[in-house]
Image (cartoon, helix red, strand yellow):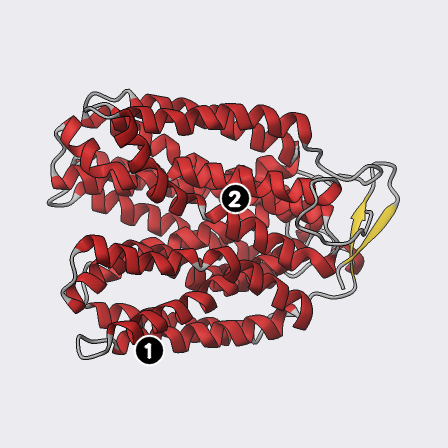
Amino acid sequence: MKNSSFKLNRFSGKMKILHLSWMAFFLTFLVWFNHAPLLGAIAQSLSLSASEIKALLILNVAIAIPARVIIGMVTDHFGPRLTYSLLLLVCSIPCFYFSLAENFEQAAIARFLLGFIGAGFVIGIRLVSEWFPANELGIAEGIYGGWGNFGSAAAAISLPALALTFGGDDGWRYAISITGLLCVIFSIIFYVEVRDTPKGSTYFKPKSSGAMEVTSRGDFLLLLLMKIPMYLVLGLLVWKLSSSPMVLLSAKSAEWIYIGLILVYCYEVIQCFKVNKSIFVKPIESIHRYQFKQVAILNILYFATFGSELAVVSMLPLFFAETFELDMVYAGLIASGYAFMNLFSRPGGGWISDRFGRKASLLVLTSGLAVGYFMMAMISSQWPLFIALLVAMSCSFFVQAGEGAVFAAVPLIKRRLTGQIAGMTGAYGNVGAVCFLTVLSFTSYQLFFLIIALCAMLSLIALIFLTEPKGSIAEINEDGSIELIGIG
């Protein structure tokens, strides 16, 4: 890998790959959240009830949890170039379908399928890790994640204005359609301009794409244990869609889905055993081992960081409006500062991780996250508004910088499994969001923030057991020779 200088104003070599990667991620989030700022017009056009609107919001994220795991496996096997290009192209279809929806059922199917585009994030994690050396990986992954994640904010800023420009009852349809068209165009650009690895480098693939590889019996059990929360959260989403006042699924349908989730988990256990049965016969050579506990710890950290970000972004405008008696437009403008921090906070977290080490950076940033949410739990109407906003912005920095630091470590665990590891860690972020929003539906704002802070404290305890990535990763070339990839 050519270790040329890191200059963002360049559009060649590894910097070209970085820019095209965050642009692709930006588009996935633009499409994934293209309905949110247009919900008023959509609801009026399709005559949606309040419960149907809530159902669309849940359906939009429901499939993203398993999708991130699946796309991670596909990426490791077929490469980021093909996977990202096809994801953008294929997901444009439900995007166009949503823009043409005439009733709730059609809109619901489209939003459910569009959840797959939320898995695009994990593809770029693997691609960027192929092009950047370990000492630049944190900031590169941070820029990819932070700038790409801004797609949701861009949707909120641009799509209402675009819909108004077209005007009429169908303005929202044209705005949504344009995001789908952008996906089609960029899928072609991405396929033409991107390569999976620098010239002369090898793209290492897993031995099997059926399940994640582990290298010890203890890791096998931990892998199965870490999959359970993802299925429980999917069950929670089914419960939400089948309970009052949002009865989208009948009780019988919900029961069948619960049974289906159990059967799918059992199938996963069987697949995991098939892929890893050799570890029960003969120990893996030490040079080829990796510790799955590293993945589990990063999953927990992303649960607390990205999970809380998604949850807080969803509720913060309402929190400010109710706490300080603001109108929703002004409250939304103030709360948007939390999301805008992503532009530099996540790259900042990656840079800090490159400079001061993965574990030390995560310890500091997670501690700041815990303190930040404890402070947010103390906000009341007696506080000056600008102080409350300052606390929220400070908390946001630690949350998003923590996300950057997590994904500065993900690609350093096992190169050929980076997509699968990123997929599982990314899925845990969505698991966290669903859990925290469910907590919010039963508690006060103050207790909601306190529970997130306590989760951050538990993450700190788990973080103590993280091993600082160092040395090299051993991978096997097609000719059987062993290649050592330096990780610092």
Disc with the residue nearer the chain's start (2 vs 1): 2
Determine if residue 274 is in view.
Answer: no
Residue located beneath label 1 in the image: 375
Q: Name the residue rendered at 16%, 27% in the picture.
A: 45
Picture residue at 36% right of the left edge, 39% below the top: 158
Q: In the picture shown, does residue 32 fall above or below 276? A: above
**Compared to 2, does 136 lie above or below?**
below
On the image, the x and y values in percent for residue 397 come to 46, 66
Which mark, residue 386?
A: none
Residue 365 spot, x, y in % from top left: 51, 72
387 vs 154, left or right, is left
Instruction: Depth check: give the residue in front, 402 or 333.
Output: 333
Q: Where's residue 193, x and y in %?
A: 68, 29
Give the camera-side residue of 316 and 479. 316
Distance, label 2 to label 1, CA atoms, is 31 Å
Q: Residues within 10 Å of mark 1 (few under 14, many from 20)?
A: some
At label 2, which amino acid type do we have?
Phe
- Using the image as rendered, state which of residue 19 and residue 221 is in the foreground: 19
Q: Quadrant of residue 448?
A: bottom left
Question: What SS does tag 2 mark?
Answer: helix
Residue name at image x 73 percent, y 46 percent: 131
In the image: residue 382, left or right of residue 143: left
Q: Residues within 10 Å of mark 2 (few under 14, many from 20)?
A: many
Q: Are marks 2 and 1 in contact (CB under 8 Å)?
A: no
Circle 1 SS class: helix
Residue appearing at x 28%, y 43% in the figure: 58
Q: Which residue is mark 2?
A: 121
Quadrant where the C terminus lies?
Answer: bottom right
Compared to 342, does 113 lie above or below? above
Of badges 2 and 1, nearer the viewer stands 1
